[in-house]
Image (tube, rainbow, N blue to C red):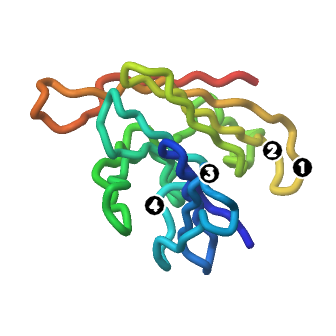
Amino acid sequence: CLLTACFAAGKRLWVSARDRGTYSVDTAARAADGWRKEGDWQLPFQCRGLLAPDLAPGLCFGLCPRTTRLCACDVRRSPPPVRYAWDDTRPCWPTSFSQENIATVARLPDSSLAYLGDGEFCIAWTIAISEDNSTIRQRALWLMSVKIGKNSPSAPLRLLHHKACIYE
């Protein structure tokens, strides 16, 4: 069973598994009583999703599986629809990596998302740089700081600020 995504809401944990659907468990209940199938769908983000109730109640923030951009889905619905996806949070390689001696820059499967509070997130990707298609010459960590917020209480969420840096 390959888990694709998870998030915690209070005492309930939600997990998605490829070709199996999404399940949740009440961690306060007895093991035999706690699990239930939520549906045949998968959560619309990869790895760990994060609730940010101070930013937007009912929204779970995560990284889109195909694009790895930051997205937010409404976990009060079944299946949870994606309400926001910010294209500017998609990883794109800096021009310094487009040198002649570098053949490939690849994003490794490792990525993570942290919520720092007050609408601020940190996204980290591990990248590999190679001189040919088979040998990894160097690994690097690409970090992006993201600020999500609103112009007014009734306005939709928007990307207020983002900045990226690479540590080789």
Disc 1 to disc 2: CB gap under 8 Å: yes
Mark-to-mark CA distance, 4 and 2: 31 Å
Q: Earlier in the sequence, mark 1 or mark 2?
A: 2
Q: Residues within 10 Å of mark 1 (few under 14, many from 20)?
A: few
Q: CA distance from mark 2 to mark 3?
A: 44 Å
Q: Which comes before the other along the chain, label 4 or label 2?
A: 4
Estimate how packed mark 3 is, as few (under 14), some (14 to 19) or many (20 or more) residues with alpha carbons within 10 Å: some
**Callout 2 crowding tier (Cα within 10 Å): few <14, some 14–19, many ≥20:** some
- Disc 3 marks which residue? 27
Residue at 33% across / 45% down in the picture?
58
Marked residue nearer the N-terminal end (2 or 3): 3
Q: Secondary structure at mark 2?
A: strand
Q: Earlier in the sequence, mark 3 or mark 4?
A: 3
Q: Which residue is mark 1?
A: 135
The residue singled out by tag 2 in the image is: 130
Q: Earlier in the sequence, mark 4 or mark 1?
A: 4
User: Split into 4 quadrants, where in the image is the N terminus?
Assistant: bottom right
- Front-lying residue, 22 or 167: 22
Q: Are marks 2 and 3 in contact (CB under 8 Å)?
A: no
Q: Quadrant of the C terminus?
A: top right
Identified by mark 2, the residue type is Ser
- Residue at disc 3, secondary structure: loop
Mark 2 or 3: in front is 3
Left or right of 73 in this view: 108: right
Q: How many angstroms separate mark 4 from mark 1 (CA)?
A: 33 Å
